Image (tube, helix red, strand yellow):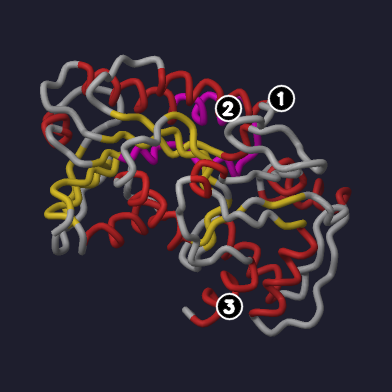
Amino acid sequence: MKYGKIVLAGGNGYLGGILAKYFSSLADEVIILARKPQAGTGHIKTLLWDGKTIGDWAYSLQEADLLVNICGKNVNCRYTEKNKKEIFDSRLIPTRLLGQAIEEMENPPKLWINITSATIYRHAEDHPQDEFTGEIGEGFSIEVCKAWENSFFETNTPNTRKVALRMGIVLGLKDGAFPRLLNLVKLGMGGKQGTGEQYMSWIHEADAAASIEWLLNHPEIKGTVNCTAPEAIKNHVFMRSIRKAFGRNFGLPAPAWLLAIGAKIIGTETELILKSRWVKPAVLLNSGFDFKYGKIDEAMTALSQAR
């Protein structure tokens, strides 16, 4: 085995499952910190935590090669005051708790990655936003990201390297945004959304997992890192790529006014669809990371063949 112990906090969701499977053949043990018990499989086991208080789970962080924090309520909801509070609390409270546990530890994790969001950058149609020159945006989702990263970096962990991984839309068949977009395509509604000119920053789930291992093996990298494919593409190109890979020739477009109605019906916000996210993974590219799926058509073909 290449690694000793990998800990995934809040790792019982979609991305946690991807990472647990990826590292299960590479590490002696993969520990998932979750609110509900799960039966262990192979090198993977689940420990109970509430994400709010120090408990026995904290011992699992001792001498870990890697801690990945994936906690956070799904932002795919209406921004009511109740939901806003839950979105903030579900990110800030576990992050500060992990920081507190690590601060008091003699042998803390070597690397702590907090999965944050590439949506922290402004609406960009003019040029890509990278880690060095990218401009932070305004609005509720950006305020969440800023507070989230502040709560991550504010703790003093001199023996634990920290990376805030600003992740784009993760493409996979099991969950996340992609299955919902694919359903639209299958129903004949997979045309452009809004003007279709807004950029989408995405990453195939295999590259998301591989990039985390890459960071584990590159101790010189710390701070904020963008986790998106090098090729951000416009919404109309993205939707066309899905239609092409999954054999649908036609897709009805969804103008902004229709999206606003639909968003209310299904309980989400149009910002998640209409904001232009043009993000460049400069740190990963500069360090030599090789994306397996750097082009959208390559990613879509792989997804269509994985069904």
Would residue 291 appear left or right of 19 to someone viewing this image? right
Q: Residue at x 48, y 25 (%)?
A: 149
Q: Amino acid at mark 3?
A: Thr
**Residue 237, label in figure:** none
Secondary element at image label 3? helix
The location of residue 139, given as percent across then percent down, is 70, 26
Asked if the magenta segment contains residue 74, the reply would be yes
Secondary element at image label 2? helix
Query: In the rendered view, would you say 276 is above or below 61?
Result: below
Q: Residues within 10 Å of mark 2 (few under 14, many from 20)?
A: some
**Residue 301, label in figure:** 3
Q: Earlier in the sequence, mark 1 or mark 3?
A: 1
The location of residue 281, given as percent across then percent down, is 56, 45
Q: Residues within 10 Å of mark 1 (few under 14, many from 20)?
A: few
Q: Residues within 10 Å of mark 3 (few under 14, many from 20)?
A: some
Query: In the rendered view, would you say 216 is above or below 56?
Result: below
Would residue 150 appear left or right of 51 to someone viewing this image? right
Q: Amino acid at mark 1?
A: Glu
Would residue 145 appear left or right of 134 to someone viewing this image? left
Cα–Cα span, label 1 and label 3: 35 Å
Q: Amino acid at mark 2?
A: Lys
Q: Nearer the viewer, mark 1 or mark 3?
A: 3
Asked if the magenta segment contains residue 293, the reply would be no
Q: Earlier in the sequence, mark 2 or mark 1?
A: 2
**Residue 138, label in figure:** 1
**Residue 84, label in figure:** 2
Q: 102 or 213, which lies in front?
A: 213
Secondary element at image label 1? loop
Q: Earlier in the sequence, mark 2 or mark 3?
A: 2
